[in-house]
Protein backbone atom coordinates (compact mmCIF):
# COMPACT_ATOMS: atom_id res chain seq x y z
CA UNK A 1 0.00 0.00 0.00
CA UNK A 2 1.50 3.32 -1.11
CA UNK A 3 1.44 5.38 2.05
CA UNK A 4 3.82 8.28 1.62
CA UNK A 5 4.34 9.17 5.26
CA UNK A 6 8.01 9.95 4.87
CA UNK A 7 7.38 12.68 2.29
CA UNK A 8 5.24 14.90 4.49
CA UNK A 9 6.75 18.01 6.00
CA UNK A 10 5.49 17.29 9.52
CA UNK A 11 5.79 13.53 9.75
CA UNK A 12 2.86 12.84 12.07
CA UNK A 13 2.23 9.21 11.17
CA UNK A 14 5.12 7.56 12.95
CA UNK A 15 3.73 8.43 16.39
CA UNK A 16 0.09 7.86 15.45
CA UNK A 17 -1.50 4.53 16.28
CA UNK A 18 -5.02 4.41 14.93
CA UNK A 19 -5.21 0.65 14.56
CA UNK A 20 -6.08 -0.56 11.06
CA UNK A 21 -6.22 3.01 9.67
CA UNK A 22 -3.19 3.54 7.45
CA UNK A 23 -3.85 6.78 5.57
CA UNK A 24 -6.36 9.37 4.51
CA UNK A 25 -7.51 9.17 0.92
CA UNK A 26 -9.35 11.70 -1.21
CA UNK A 27 -12.87 10.67 -2.19
CA UNK A 28 -12.52 12.58 -5.46
CA UNK A 29 -9.02 11.95 -6.81
CA UNK A 30 -7.86 9.07 -4.61
CA UNK A 31 -4.63 10.79 -3.53
CA UNK A 32 -3.35 9.51 -0.20
CA UNK A 33 -2.11 11.48 2.77
CA UNK A 34 -0.66 10.47 6.12
CA UNK A 35 -3.04 10.26 9.05
CA UNK A 36 -3.38 13.74 10.52
CA UNK A 37 -5.92 16.41 11.49
CA UNK A 38 -6.75 17.35 7.91
CA UNK A 39 -10.02 17.01 6.04
CA UNK A 40 -9.53 18.33 2.50
CA UNK A 41 -7.31 17.09 -0.32
CA UNK A 42 -4.34 19.36 -1.04
CA UNK A 43 -4.65 18.73 -4.75
CA UNK A 44 -8.38 18.89 -5.50
CA UNK A 45 -9.99 20.04 -2.19
CA UNK A 46 -12.12 16.86 -2.14
CA UNK A 47 -13.09 15.39 1.25
CA UNK A 48 -10.63 12.96 2.83
CA UNK A 49 -11.68 9.63 4.28
CA UNK A 50 -9.89 7.00 6.31
CA UNK A 51 -8.23 4.18 4.36
CA UNK A 52 -7.56 0.87 6.08
CA UNK A 53 -5.60 -2.28 6.00
CA UNK A 54 -8.55 -4.37 7.16
CA UNK A 55 -8.12 -7.73 8.90
CA UNK A 56 -7.27 -10.43 6.35
CA UNK A 57 -7.29 -13.54 8.55
CA UNK A 58 -10.01 -16.10 9.13
CA UNK A 59 -13.38 -14.36 8.88
CA UNK A 60 -15.03 -16.72 11.36
CA UNK A 61 -12.35 -15.87 13.90
CA UNK A 62 -13.04 -12.17 13.35
CA UNK A 63 -16.76 -12.74 13.76
CA UNK A 64 -16.22 -14.60 17.01
CA UNK A 65 -13.90 -11.88 18.31
CA UNK A 66 -16.52 -9.22 17.52
CA UNK A 67 -19.31 -11.19 19.17
CA UNK A 68 -17.19 -11.72 22.29
CA UNK A 69 -16.17 -8.06 22.38
CA UNK A 70 -17.38 -5.16 24.52
CA UNK A 71 -21.12 -4.42 24.42
CA UNK A 72 -20.55 -1.12 22.63
CA UNK A 73 -18.92 0.16 19.42
CA UNK A 74 -15.48 -0.99 20.52
CA UNK A 75 -16.41 -4.56 19.58
CA UNK A 76 -15.72 -3.31 16.03
CA UNK A 77 -12.32 -1.79 16.90
CA UNK A 78 -10.53 -3.89 14.23
CA UNK A 79 -12.62 -2.01 11.60
CA UNK A 80 -12.25 1.49 13.07
CA UNK A 81 -9.49 4.14 13.21
CA UNK A 82 -8.73 3.46 16.86
CA UNK A 83 -5.90 1.71 18.70
CA UNK A 84 -6.39 -1.96 19.58
CA UNK A 85 -6.62 -1.19 23.32
CA UNK A 86 -9.31 1.46 22.81
CA UNK A 87 -11.79 -0.26 25.12
CA UNK A 88 -9.52 0.59 28.08
CA UNK A 89 -9.59 4.34 27.31
CA UNK A 90 -12.04 6.60 29.15
CA UNK A 91 -15.01 6.95 26.78
CA UNK A 92 -18.77 7.28 26.92
CA UNK A 93 -18.77 3.82 25.28
CA UNK A 94 -21.73 4.31 22.94
CA UNK A 95 -23.40 1.81 20.66
CA UNK A 96 -25.06 -1.59 20.58
CA UNK A 97 -28.40 0.18 20.84
CA UNK A 98 -31.62 -1.77 20.38
CA UNK A 99 -32.81 -2.94 17.00
CA UNK A 100 -36.53 -3.07 17.71
CA UNK A 101 -38.73 -5.39 15.65
CA UNK A 102 -41.55 -2.95 14.98
CA UNK A 103 -44.49 -5.23 14.17
CA UNK A 104 -47.20 -2.81 15.26
CA UNK A 105 -45.70 0.06 13.29
CA UNK A 106 -45.31 -2.32 10.34
CA UNK A 107 -49.01 -3.10 10.46
CA UNK A 108 -49.92 0.59 10.43
CA UNK A 109 -47.60 1.27 7.51
CA UNK A 110 -48.48 -1.90 5.61
CA UNK A 111 -44.95 -3.32 5.73
CA UNK A 112 -45.03 -7.10 5.37
CA UNK A 113 -41.35 -7.89 4.83
CA UNK A 114 -40.23 -7.08 8.39
CA UNK A 115 -39.76 -3.62 9.86
CA UNK A 116 -37.14 -2.64 12.42
CA UNK A 117 -36.32 0.57 14.24
CA UNK A 118 -32.66 1.09 15.10
CA UNK A 119 -33.13 3.16 18.22
CA UNK A 120 -30.09 5.33 18.81
CA UNK A 121 -31.86 7.37 21.47
CA UNK A 122 -30.35 4.74 23.79
CA UNK A 123 -26.84 6.19 23.48
CA UNK A 124 -25.19 7.93 26.48
CA UNK A 125 -26.28 11.46 25.48
CA UNK A 126 -29.39 10.19 23.71
CA UNK A 127 -28.42 10.61 20.09
CA UNK A 128 -26.36 8.84 17.47
CA UNK A 129 -23.69 11.56 17.80
CA UNK A 130 -21.99 9.68 20.66
CA UNK A 131 -20.75 7.19 18.07
CA UNK A 132 -18.96 9.73 15.89
CA UNK A 133 -17.60 11.69 18.84
CA UNK A 134 -16.11 8.59 20.49
CA UNK A 135 -13.98 7.97 17.40
CA UNK A 136 -13.02 11.64 17.05
CA UNK A 137 -11.82 11.65 20.68
CA UNK A 138 -9.38 8.85 19.89
CA UNK A 139 -8.07 10.85 16.92
CA UNK A 140 -7.81 13.99 19.07
CA UNK A 141 -5.79 12.05 21.61
CA UNK A 142 -3.54 10.61 18.93
CA UNK A 143 -2.86 14.05 17.44
CA UNK A 144 -2.20 15.66 20.82
CA UNK A 145 -5.20 18.02 21.01
CA UNK A 146 -6.30 19.07 24.47
CA UNK A 147 -9.47 21.00 23.54
CA UNK A 148 -12.44 19.43 21.77
CA UNK A 149 -14.78 21.57 19.73
CA UNK A 150 -17.48 21.36 17.08
CA UNK A 151 -20.09 23.21 15.12
CA UNK A 152 -23.36 21.61 16.10
CA UNK A 153 -27.06 21.50 15.32
CA UNK A 154 -27.51 20.52 19.00
CA UNK A 155 -26.90 16.84 19.61
CA UNK A 156 -23.24 16.99 18.68
CA UNK A 157 -22.55 19.71 21.25
CA UNK A 158 -23.94 17.52 24.05
CA UNK A 159 -22.03 14.47 22.84
CA UNK A 160 -18.76 16.43 22.70
CA UNK A 161 -19.38 17.96 26.14
CA UNK A 162 -19.96 14.55 27.71
CA UNK A 163 -17.09 12.80 25.93
CA UNK A 164 -14.69 15.62 26.87
CA UNK A 165 -15.76 15.43 30.50
CA UNK A 166 -15.29 11.66 30.59
CA UNK A 167 -11.93 11.67 28.80
CA UNK A 168 -10.46 14.74 30.48
CA UNK A 169 -10.41 17.23 27.60
CA UNK A 170 -11.38 20.86 27.74
CA UNK A 171 -14.36 21.56 25.47
CA UNK A 172 -15.71 24.64 23.76
CA UNK A 173 -18.62 24.02 21.40
CA UNK A 174 -20.62 26.23 19.06
CA UNK A 175 -24.36 26.09 18.31
CA UNK A 176 -26.96 28.30 16.63
CA UNK A 177 -28.36 30.57 19.39
CA UNK A 178 -32.00 29.49 18.92
CA UNK A 179 -31.92 25.73 19.64
CA UNK A 180 -34.35 23.72 21.75
CA UNK A 181 -33.87 24.07 25.52
CA UNK A 182 -33.19 20.35 25.91
CA UNK A 183 -30.25 20.59 23.52
CA UNK A 184 -28.86 23.78 25.04
CA UNK A 185 -28.99 22.40 28.59
CA UNK A 186 -27.38 19.12 27.53
CA UNK A 187 -24.63 20.98 25.73
CA UNK A 188 -23.86 23.07 28.81
CA UNK A 189 -24.36 20.71 31.74
CA UNK A 190 -21.11 18.79 31.30
CA UNK A 191 -19.16 21.87 32.29
CA UNK A 192 -17.43 22.80 29.04
CA UNK A 193 -17.84 26.14 27.32
CA UNK A 194 -20.88 26.58 25.10
CA UNK A 195 -21.14 29.47 22.66
CA UNK A 196 -24.39 30.44 20.94
CA UNK A 197 -23.81 32.01 17.53
CA UNK A 198 -26.28 34.49 16.12
CA UNK A 199 -27.02 32.72 12.87
CA UNK A 200 -27.90 29.36 11.31
CA UNK A 201 -25.86 26.17 11.55
CA UNK A 202 -24.23 27.09 8.27
CA UNK A 203 -23.05 30.36 9.83
CA UNK A 204 -21.74 28.41 12.84
CA UNK A 205 -19.87 26.04 10.57
CA UNK A 206 -18.32 28.85 8.54
CA UNK A 207 -17.24 30.53 11.77
CA UNK A 208 -15.57 27.32 12.97
CA UNK A 209 -13.69 26.95 9.68
CA UNK A 210 -12.32 30.47 10.20
CA UNK A 211 -11.40 29.69 13.78
CA UNK A 212 -9.39 26.64 12.70
CA UNK A 213 -7.28 28.78 10.39
CA UNK A 214 -6.65 31.36 13.11
CA UNK A 215 -4.18 31.23 16.03
CA UNK A 216 -7.26 31.52 18.30
CA UNK A 217 -8.19 27.94 17.40
CA UNK A 218 -4.71 26.46 17.55
CA UNK A 219 -4.51 23.10 19.28
CA UNK A 220 -8.25 22.55 18.98
CA UNK A 221 -9.73 19.36 17.63
CA UNK A 222 -13.01 20.20 15.90
CA UNK A 223 -14.63 16.80 15.76
CA UNK A 224 -16.65 17.53 12.61
CA UNK A 225 -14.15 19.81 10.85
CA UNK A 226 -10.43 19.02 11.15
CA UNK A 227 -11.20 15.58 12.64
CA UNK A 228 -14.10 14.96 10.25
CA UNK A 229 -12.58 11.95 8.44
CA UNK A 230 -12.31 10.06 11.76
CA UNK A 231 -15.62 11.35 13.13
CA UNK A 232 -17.43 10.08 10.04
CA UNK A 233 -16.18 6.54 10.60
CA UNK A 234 -18.25 6.32 13.79
CA UNK A 235 -21.38 6.07 11.64
CA UNK A 236 -20.13 2.81 10.14
CA UNK A 237 -20.91 1.18 13.47
CA UNK A 238 -24.62 1.64 12.73
CA UNK A 239 -24.20 -0.55 9.66
CA UNK A 240 -22.16 -3.12 11.59
CA UNK A 241 -24.68 -3.31 14.43
CA UNK A 242 -27.75 -3.53 12.22
CA UNK A 243 -26.23 -6.43 10.27
CA UNK A 244 -24.95 -8.23 13.37
CA UNK A 245 -28.34 -7.81 15.09
CA UNK A 246 -30.06 -9.26 12.02
CA UNK A 247 -27.84 -12.34 12.30
CA UNK A 248 -25.09 -11.00 10.02
CA UNK A 249 -27.38 -10.05 7.19
CA UNK A 250 -27.82 -6.81 5.29
CA UNK A 251 -31.42 -5.52 5.33
CA UNK A 252 -33.03 -4.86 1.96
CA UNK A 253 -33.84 -1.22 2.70
CA UNK A 254 -32.55 1.37 5.19
CA UNK A 255 -34.10 4.80 5.82
CA UNK A 256 -31.52 7.29 7.14
CA UNK A 257 -31.89 10.96 8.15
CA UNK A 258 -29.75 13.45 6.24
CA UNK A 259 -28.24 16.58 7.75
CA UNK A 260 -24.69 16.92 6.34
CA UNK A 261 -25.09 13.47 4.79
CA UNK A 262 -22.09 12.03 6.65
CA UNK A 263 -24.07 9.36 8.46
CA UNK A 264 -25.75 8.01 5.33
CA UNK A 265 -22.51 8.00 3.38
CA UNK A 266 -20.63 6.10 6.07
CA UNK A 267 -23.38 3.54 6.64
CA UNK A 268 -22.97 2.66 2.98
CA UNK A 269 -19.19 2.46 3.49
CA UNK A 270 -19.70 0.17 6.49
CA UNK A 271 -21.96 -2.19 4.54
CA UNK A 272 -19.43 -2.41 1.72
CA UNK A 273 -16.68 -3.26 4.22
CA UNK A 274 -18.74 -6.06 5.77
CA UNK A 275 -19.28 -7.54 2.30
CA UNK A 276 -15.60 -7.21 1.43
CA UNK A 277 -14.56 -8.90 4.66
CA UNK A 278 -17.05 -11.72 4.11
CA UNK A 279 -18.87 -11.04 7.39
CA UNK A 280 -22.14 -10.76 5.43
CA UNK A 281 -23.23 -12.18 2.11
CA UNK A 282 -23.14 -9.77 -0.82
CA UNK A 283 -26.62 -8.69 -1.82
CA UNK A 284 -28.33 -5.61 -3.21
CA UNK A 285 -29.61 -3.09 -0.70
CA UNK A 286 -31.43 0.22 -1.10
CA UNK A 287 -30.52 3.33 0.85
CA UNK A 288 -33.10 6.07 1.37
CA UNK A 289 -32.34 9.56 2.65
CA UNK A 290 -34.88 11.47 4.75
CA UNK A 291 -35.11 15.24 5.15
CA UNK A 292 -37.55 17.80 6.52
CA UNK A 293 -39.28 19.84 3.84
CA UNK A 294 -38.14 23.07 5.52
CA UNK A 295 -34.52 22.04 4.99
CA UNK A 296 -34.47 19.71 2.01
CA UNK A 297 -31.53 20.66 -0.21
CA UNK A 298 -30.71 17.02 -0.95
CA UNK A 299 -34.22 15.71 -1.61
CA UNK A 300 -34.89 18.77 -3.79
CA UNK A 301 -31.81 17.96 -5.87
CA UNK A 302 -32.78 14.28 -5.96
CA UNK A 303 -36.26 15.00 -7.29
CA UNK A 304 -34.94 17.49 -9.84
CA UNK A 305 -32.43 14.95 -11.11
CA UNK A 306 -29.49 17.22 -10.23
CA UNK A 307 -26.00 16.11 -9.18
CA UNK A 308 -25.27 19.33 -7.35
CA UNK A 309 -27.03 20.43 -4.18
CA UNK A 310 -28.22 24.02 -4.03
CA UNK A 311 -28.01 25.48 -0.46
CA UNK A 312 -31.23 26.43 1.36
CA UNK A 313 -32.04 28.58 4.37
CA UNK A 314 -33.50 26.14 6.93
CA UNK A 315 -36.91 26.63 8.52
CA UNK A 316 -38.12 23.45 10.23
CA UNK A 317 -38.75 21.95 13.67
CA UNK A 318 -36.25 19.22 12.74
CA UNK A 319 -33.38 21.39 13.92
CA UNK A 320 -30.88 18.57 14.28
CA UNK A 321 -31.15 18.08 10.51
CA UNK A 322 -31.18 21.79 9.63
CA UNK A 323 -28.04 22.01 7.52
CA UNK A 324 -28.76 24.12 4.46
CA UNK A 325 -25.44 23.44 2.75
CA UNK A 326 -24.70 19.74 3.35
CA UNK A 327 -21.06 18.77 2.81
CA UNK A 328 -21.85 15.21 1.74
CA UNK A 329 -25.00 16.03 -0.24
CA UNK A 330 -23.66 14.91 -3.65
CA UNK A 331 -22.52 11.57 -2.19
CA UNK A 332 -25.98 11.00 -0.70
CA UNK A 333 -27.51 11.57 -4.15
CA UNK A 334 -25.05 9.15 -5.68
CA UNK A 335 -25.68 6.41 -3.09
CA UNK A 336 -29.49 6.75 -3.24
CA UNK A 337 -29.42 6.53 -7.03
CA UNK A 338 -26.82 3.77 -7.25
CA UNK A 339 -28.61 1.52 -4.74
CA UNK A 340 -32.12 2.07 -6.12
CA UNK A 341 -33.20 4.12 -3.11
CA UNK A 342 -34.47 7.69 -3.05
CA UNK A 343 -34.33 10.92 -1.05
CA UNK A 344 -37.68 12.23 0.21
CA UNK A 345 -38.95 14.86 2.63
CA UNK A 346 -41.95 15.50 4.89
CA UNK A 347 -43.35 18.72 6.34
CA UNK A 348 -43.37 19.65 10.03
CA UNK A 349 -46.92 18.45 10.60
CA UNK A 350 -46.04 15.06 9.16
CA UNK A 351 -42.96 14.98 11.40
CA UNK A 352 -45.10 15.49 14.50
CA UNK A 353 -47.65 12.88 13.33
CA UNK A 354 -44.84 10.40 12.76
CA UNK A 355 -43.30 11.01 16.21
CA UNK A 356 -46.69 10.20 17.73
CA UNK A 357 -47.22 7.19 15.47
CA UNK A 358 -43.89 5.66 16.53
CA UNK A 359 -44.59 6.42 20.18
CA UNK A 360 -48.08 4.92 20.15
CA UNK A 361 -47.17 1.80 18.16
CA UNK A 362 -43.75 0.93 19.56
CA UNK A 363 -43.24 2.86 22.78
CA UNK A 364 -40.33 4.79 21.28
CA UNK A 365 -40.27 8.54 21.79
CA UNK A 366 -38.18 9.96 18.96
CA UNK A 367 -36.86 13.43 18.48
CA UNK A 368 -37.86 15.33 15.36
CA UNK A 369 -35.19 13.57 13.26
CA UNK A 370 -36.92 10.25 14.05
CA UNK A 371 -40.21 11.80 13.02
CA UNK A 372 -38.56 12.66 9.74
CA UNK A 373 -37.41 9.09 9.03
CA UNK A 374 -40.70 7.47 10.07
CA UNK A 375 -42.70 10.09 8.17
CA UNK A 376 -40.56 9.67 5.07
CA UNK A 377 -40.89 5.88 5.32
CA UNK A 378 -44.67 6.24 5.27
CA UNK A 379 -44.48 8.62 2.30
CA UNK A 380 -42.09 6.35 0.37
CA UNK A 381 -44.48 3.44 0.81
CA UNK A 382 -47.41 5.56 -0.34
CA UNK A 383 -45.62 6.74 -3.45
CA UNK A 384 -44.33 3.26 -4.24
CA UNK A 385 -40.61 3.95 -3.88
CA UNK A 386 -40.09 1.74 -0.82
CA UNK A 387 -41.15 -1.89 -1.20
CA UNK A 388 -43.27 -2.95 1.82
CA UNK A 389 -42.56 -6.61 1.06
CA UNK A 390 -38.84 -6.18 1.81
CA UNK A 391 -36.97 -6.07 5.12
CA UNK A 392 -36.69 -2.45 6.16
CA UNK A 393 -34.71 -0.70 8.89
CA UNK A 394 -35.66 2.85 9.93
CA UNK A 395 -33.24 4.88 12.03
CA UNK A 396 -34.29 6.84 15.07
CA UNK A 397 -31.24 8.94 15.81
CA UNK A 398 -32.35 10.95 18.85
CA UNK A 399 -34.53 11.23 21.94
CA UNK A 400 -37.90 12.98 22.05
CA UNK A 401 -37.11 14.47 25.46
CA UNK A 402 -34.74 16.87 23.70
CA UNK A 403 -37.42 18.23 21.37
CA UNK A 404 -40.46 18.39 23.64
CA UNK A 405 -41.62 21.62 21.99
CA UNK A 406 -42.42 19.72 18.80
CA UNK A 407 -45.18 17.65 20.40
CA UNK A 408 -46.07 19.63 23.52
CA UNK A 409 -48.73 21.81 21.83
CA UNK A 410 -50.69 18.74 20.71
CA UNK A 411 -49.93 16.35 23.58
CA UNK A 412 -51.07 16.42 27.18
CA UNK A 413 -53.36 14.91 29.81
CA UNK A 414 -56.58 13.33 28.54
CA UNK A 415 -58.33 14.89 31.52
CA UNK A 416 -57.52 16.81 34.71
CA UNK A 417 -59.94 15.97 37.50
CA UNK A 418 -60.61 16.25 41.22
CA UNK A 419 -59.32 13.18 43.14
CA UNK A 420 -62.65 11.40 43.46
CA UNK A 421 -64.44 8.58 41.67
CA UNK A 422 -67.40 10.64 40.54
CA UNK A 423 -65.10 12.99 38.69
CA UNK A 424 -63.34 10.04 37.06
CA UNK A 425 -66.69 8.50 36.09
CA UNK A 426 -67.72 11.79 34.55
CA UNK A 427 -64.53 11.86 32.48
CA UNK A 428 -65.76 8.70 30.68
CA UNK A 429 -62.41 6.89 30.79
CA UNK A 430 -63.38 3.72 32.69
CA UNK A 431 -63.51 0.32 31.07
C1 LIG B 1 -26.47 14.89 13.35
C2 LIG B 1 -27.71 14.14 13.30
C3 LIG B 1 -28.07 13.34 12.19
C4 LIG B 1 -27.32 13.16 10.91
O1 LIG B 1 -26.31 13.99 10.62
P1 LIG B 1 -25.36 13.91 9.34
O2 LIG B 1 -24.73 15.26 9.37
O3 LIG B 1 -26.21 13.70 8.13
O4 LIG B 1 -24.40 12.82 9.57
C5 LIG B 1 -29.24 12.61 12.29
N1 LIG B 1 -30.02 12.66 13.36
C6 LIG B 1 -29.71 13.39 14.44
C7 LIG B 1 -30.63 13.38 15.60
C8 LIG B 1 -28.55 14.15 14.45
O5 LIG B 1 -28.25 14.86 15.54
Image: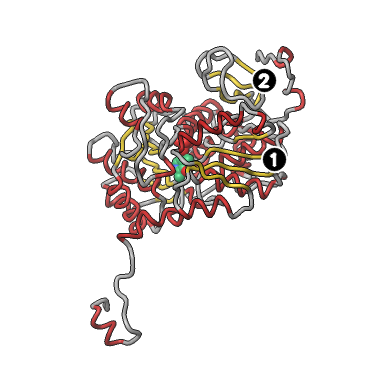
Mark 1 Cα within 10 Å, few/some/many (few <14, many 20+)? some
Please report the residue visible at 54 percent of the width from the left and 53 percent of the height from the top. 186
Q: Which residue is at the front of the view, 351 or 95?
A: 351
Q: Compare marks 2 and 1 and give the one earlier in the sequence.
A: 2
Q: Which residue is at the front of the view, 391 or 353?
A: 353
Please report the residue visible at 73 percent of the width from the left and 19 percent of the height from the top. 10
Which residue in the structure is indicated by mark 1? 86
The answer to whether residue 237 is seen in the rendering is yes
Which residue in the structure is indicated by mark 2? 34
User: Is the Cβ of the residue at disc 2 closer than 8 Å to that at disc 1?
Assistant: no
Quick one: SS at disc 1? helix
Mark 2 Cα within 10 Å, few/some/many (few <14, many 20+)? many
Which quadrant holds residue 148? top right
Q: Residue furthest right?
A: 15
**How is the rendered protein coloured?**
secondary structure
Residues at marks 2 and 1, CA–CA distance in whole angstroms: 21 Å
Amino acid sequence: MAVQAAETPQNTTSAVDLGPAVALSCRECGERFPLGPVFACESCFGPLEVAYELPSGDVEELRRAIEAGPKNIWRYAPLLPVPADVASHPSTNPGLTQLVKADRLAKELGVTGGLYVKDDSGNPTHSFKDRVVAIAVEAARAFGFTTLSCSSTGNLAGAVGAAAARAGFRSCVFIPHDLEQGKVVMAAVYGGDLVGIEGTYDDVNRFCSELIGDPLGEGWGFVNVNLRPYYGEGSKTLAYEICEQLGWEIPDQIVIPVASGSQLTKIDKGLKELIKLGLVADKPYRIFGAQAEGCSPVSTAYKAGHDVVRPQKPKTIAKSLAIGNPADGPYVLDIARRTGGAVEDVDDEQVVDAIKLLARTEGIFAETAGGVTVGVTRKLIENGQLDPALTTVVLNTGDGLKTLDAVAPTTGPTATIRPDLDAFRAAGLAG
